[in-house]
Amino acid sequence: MVDGLPWYTLLYGEYSSRDAAKRAIKALPQTIQQYGPFVRDIADIKRSSTPEMTRVN
């Protein structure tokens, strides 16, 4: 929960570098970019206070 609302993390692809991941964000449709996607290392996600992951595809 963030500010009392559910928080979901969506993993989108695997990239060779942080810059490559940032370029992929810039290539997303504006309707997705409006949500403010950002690059985060999978290790950081696993170390977070709520690292539960569920694969949906």
Image (cartoon, helix red, strand yellow):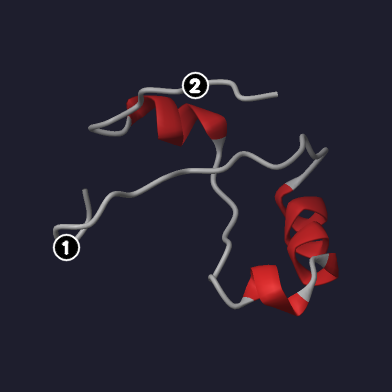
Of 12 and 15, the residue lying toward us: 12
The quadrant where residue 56 appears? top right
37 lies left or right of 5: right
Which residue is disc 1 drawn over?
3
CA–CA distance in space, label 1 to label 2: 22 Å
Label 2 residue SS: loop
Dot 1 amino acid type: Asp
Residue 37 pos. (x, y %):
58, 62
Task: Name the residue at 82% across, 53% down.
Answer: 20
Say above or below: 55 vs 17.
above
Say above or below: 56 vs 32.
above
46 lies left or right of 36: left
The quadrant where residue 11 appears? top right
Asked if the residue under mark 2 is in contact with the one under mark 1, i.e. CB atoms within 8 Å, the reply is: no
Task: Name the residue at 57% across, 60% down.
Answer: 38
Say above or below: 27 vs 48.
below
Dot 2 amino acid type: Thr
Q: Residue furthest left?
A: 4
Q: Earlier in the sequence, mark 1 or mark 2?
A: 1
Task: Name the residue at 54% across, 70% down.
Answer: 36
Residue 54, label in figure: 2
